[in-house]
Image (cartoon, rainbow, N blue to C red):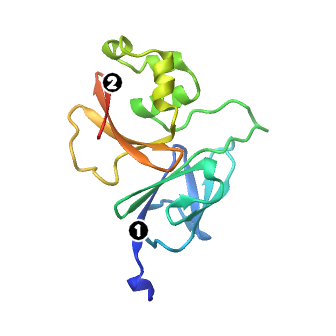
């Protein structure tokens, strides 16, 4: 089968830190929406621009990370493949995690809960939501997820009212779409697409 007849997927790579990439050995400053054969392995080397992070390479094959799986969350959506590359910290410089580029309230909430910083997490929730959830509830809600990615590649033209749509990616590389209702900069409700 010729390359023009091979089934292809559109690759979208996301990080929460500044970096550049090597895609199968070729330098790329941005890795957004390029077509790639679904049955070919893709080697991604992430080169962080901050000294507190280490570079690494992951291999993606048939919609799964097969090398450095704990640093890479992958999920498929129709003809799209979303790859979220996580930071690899350099403990020689500092054992403390340095803030990433996570700037939205849902991303900051996810990071705070993952780091078990419930004081910071609760500062992102509205008074109404705070009355319905505690530390254990927050931890339990996010426990099965390894990454959060804003839905700006599949349904980006849709309007979600006062909310924002994010995929929460689980340990099996399945992405579930959630809507975060934002009122005056605080998360007021979280609902699932299902």
Q: Secondary structure at mark 1?
A: strand
The label on residue 122 is: none
- 162 relative to 165 in the view: left or right: left
Image coords of residue 107 (percent x, y): 45, 34
Q: Residue drawn at (50%, 50%), measured in percent from left and top?
A: 173
- Does residue 33 appear in the picture of this structure? no
Image height check: is 19 above or below 113? below
Of the two numbered discs 2 and 1 in the rendering, the one whose residue sits closer to the viewer: 1
Image coords of residue 96 (percent x, y): 69, 29
**Separation of marks 2 and 1 at Cα, in angstroms:** 35 Å
The image quadrant of residue 167 is: top left
Image height check: is 18 above or below 111? below
Image coords of residue 47 (percent x, y): 63, 55
Q: Residue furthest right?
A: 92
- Name the one closer to the observer, 55 or 86: 86
Mark 2 vs 1: CB contact within 8 A: no
Q: Secondary structure at mark 2?
A: loop
Q: Residue drawn at (51%, 43%), measured in percent from left and top?
A: 16
Q: Residue drawn at (54%, 59%), measured in percent from left and top?
A: 64
> Which residue corresponds to mark 1?
9
Q: Residue drawn at (56%, 21%), measured in percent from left and top?
A: 117
The label on residue 185 is: 2
Q: Assign the C terminus to one quadrant of the image.
A: top left
At label 2, counting other C-alpha atoms closer than 10 Å, the crowd grade (few under 14, some 14-19, many 20 or more) is few
Image coords of residue 2 (percent x, y): 44, 88
Image height check: is 113 above or below 44? above
The image quadrant of residue 68 is: bottom right
Q: Assign the N terminus to one quadrant of the image.
A: bottom left
Mark earlier in primary sequence (2, 1): 1
């Amino acid at each position: 089968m010729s390359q023009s007849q091979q089934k292809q997927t559109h690759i979208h790579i996301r990080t929460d830190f500044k970096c550049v990439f090597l895609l199968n050995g070729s330098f790329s400053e941005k890795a957004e929406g390029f077509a790639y054969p679904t049955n070919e392995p893709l080697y991604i080397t992430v080169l962080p621009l901050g000294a507190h992070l280490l570079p690494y390479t992951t291999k993606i094959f048939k919609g799964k990370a097969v090398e450095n799986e704990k640093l890479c969350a992958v999920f498929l959506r129709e003809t799209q493949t979303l790859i979220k590359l996580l930071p690899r910290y350099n403990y020689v410089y500092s054992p403390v995690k340095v803030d990433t580029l996570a700037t939205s309230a849902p991303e900051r909430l996810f990071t705070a809960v993952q780091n078990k910083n419930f004081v910071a997490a609760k500062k992102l929730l509205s008074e109404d939501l705070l009355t319905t959830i505690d530390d254990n509830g927050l931890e339990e809600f996010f426990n099965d997820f390894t990454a959060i990615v804003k839905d700006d590649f599949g349904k980006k033209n849709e309007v979600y009212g006062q909310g924002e749509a994010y995929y929460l990616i689980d340990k099996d590389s399945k992405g579930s779409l959630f809507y975060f209702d934002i009122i005056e900069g605080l998360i007021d409700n979280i609902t699932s697409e299902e």
